[in-house]
Amino acid sequence: MRPDLSAVPIVDLAPLVHGGPDKRSAAHAIDQACRGSGFFYVVGHGVDEALAARLDALCRAFFAQDLDRKLEIRMEKAGRAWRGYFPVGGELTSGKPDLKEGIYFGAEHGDDHPRVRAGLPLHGNNLFPDLPGFREAVLAWMAEMTRLGHVILEGMALGLGLPASYFAEHYTADPTILFRAFHYPPPHDASEGWGVGEHTDYGLLTILRQDDAGGLQVKSGGLWIEAPPVPGSFVCNIGDMLDRMTGGQYRSTPHRVHNRSGRNRISLPFFFDPGWDAKIQAIDMGRADGRAGERWDHQDVHEFRGTYGQWLLGKVAKVFPELGRTAGVT
């Protein structure tokens, strides 16, 4: 039976979170979603709603500040770590400035971390705003999202007919984690363009907490469909590396955002990706055509050879060209 591509499906994760005989049914639902639209909502995830509400409120308080205050943690201050704040228009998607501002966070790496001492980009300390409770909320959120990422990938592994621990053993024992808080201000008029243009995500799995403003669109079956807010849920989608690993049986799906609500939109995407030094290889399950000519960036992800860190650096340097030049990434 062909999957229904007219709407983003909802998957109840409770059997995977709590264990039990229904694990396989939840895994099957994830597998069907990944073979269909490549997007799915998750409920029954066990994430504390109070933590989500607290983080949302703190992000709104940060973005409501004057620009000078926000620039106190601008990305340039973090150097190669690529952490901190960027203003509206400071990030490029498909070579065009996005109509959003945001803060980048990642795993906390002290100055004595070997990769920090080596000057490796995307490793270092986070820059936190001077708002009470902000640092604690972000660190708690990243810990919860990491837990949830392992749960979802366990379901994916079972859905693919692999051992439940496949991804944890091969790719995510020490995952690359990136958390971003985005603010999409309401555009002055409809001609201003997209909050973020058409793109696919880079890695394994994106877990998104969106507010009630809406605006997320998913390209499914050649058509753009809405992914409206579902209370208490997360929106999940697969990235280019999972497309690569599964030989295209799971597709990294293009998506975009246009804030048409007339209100401020807060988006909290978390990227749960392979370890930095993990060598990306295809799972032995057949190979589909990468269809480079049909992708938004005309790349064939199946031709990539190397580590996830190499892939990620090349991608991020295109999003922030100036920081990419500073870090020596071309």
Image (spheres, rainbow, N blue to C red):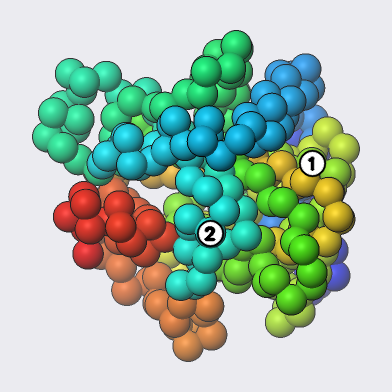
Expressed as whole percent of the image width and height from the top left, the position of residue 222 reads 71, 82
Quadrant of the frame with the N terminus: bottom right
Q: Is residue 125 left or right of residue 158?
A: left
Residue sitting at 30 percent across and 52 percent down?
A: 323
Residue 266 shows in this picture? yes
| Mark 1 or 2, closer to the camera | 2
Quadrant of the frame with the C terminus: bottom left
Residue 253 shows in this picture? no
Q: Is residue 157 left or right of residue 125?
A: right
Q: Is residue 306 left or right of residue 69?
A: left
Q: Nearer the viewer, residue 302 or 69?
A: 69
Badge 1 amino acid: Asp
Residue 33 against residue 221 in the figure, above or below: above
Q: Nearer the viewer, residue 33 or 223?
A: 223
Secondary structure category for the residue under label 2: loop
Residue corresponding to mark 2? 89
Determine the CA span between mark 1 and mark 2.
Answer: 21 Å
Expressed as whole percent of the image width and height from the top left, the position of residue 116 reads 20, 30
Residue corresponding to mark 1? 211
- Asked if disc 1 and disc 2 are in contact, CB closer than 8 Å, the reply is no
Expressed as whole percent of the image width and height from the top left, the position of residue 316 reads 37, 56
Return the mark for residue 135: none
Q: Is residue 146 left or right of residue 167?
A: right
Residue sitting at 38 percent across and 57 percent down?
A: 320
Residue sitting at 77 percent across and 17 percent down?
A: 50
Badge 2 amino acid: Gly
Residue 162 against residue 65 in the figure, above or below: below
Q: Residue furthest left?
A: 118
